[in-house]
Image (cartoon, rainbow, N blue to C red):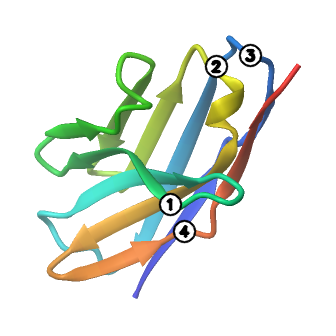
Amino acid sequence: QVQLVESGGGLVQPGGSLRLSCAASGIIFSGNIMGWYRQAPGKQRELVADISSGGSTGYGDSAKGRFTISRDNAANTVNLQMNSLKPEDTAVYYCNLRVGGMEYWGKGTPVTVSS
């Protein structure tokens, strides 16, 4: 069983920055993909960014140019650096891990961008 625990969410003013972290524990097979998704009230969950164990990254349109995903394979952690935050980035951010046809989710960390 894999557990994912997010941290780093909170309230930030427009234009500000936040860094989200996710720690994975349990039996984690190599070749996995870790990522961040978000879900705003009344909207579907959407991909923010993901990164393979080899370091290949992918970004959703809303994240390109503003967010950076990184990971530490030895520590089984994935981070999301979010800059130039906008009110429309307000959502619950979920950590995700995919491997071998299985998918795991964290409980989410809320991010609110407001003045």
Query: Which comes before the other along the chain, label 3 or label 1?
Result: 3
SS state under label 3? loop
Along the polypeptide, which appears first: circle 1 or circle 4? 1
Residue bearing mark 2: 17
Residue sitting at x 11%, y 63%: 31
For disc 3, the marked residue is: 14
Disc number lying in front (1 or 4)? 1
Residue at 49% across / 27% down in the picture? 81
The Cα atoms of the two marked residues, 2 and 4, are separated by 22 Å
Tag 1 residue: 45
Question: x, y (%) of residue 14?
Answer: 74, 16
Q: CA distance from mark 3 to mark 1?
A: 22 Å
- Nearer to us in this view, 114 or 105: 114
Residue 16 screen position, x and y as percent:
69, 15
Image position, residue 27 (x, y; %): 31, 81
Amino acid at the residue labelled 4: Gly
Task: Find out whether the residues at labels 3 and 4 contact each other: C-beta distance under 8 Å.
Answer: no
Q: Can you tell which of label 3 and label 4 is closer to the viewer?
A: 3
Q: Tell me whether the residue at label 3 lies in contact with that at label 1, contact meaning CB atoms closer than 8 angstroms.
A: no
Q: Report, in whole angstroms, how far the alpha carbon at label 1 lies from the one at label 4.
A: 13 Å
**Residue under the image location 88 percent in, 19 percent down:** 115
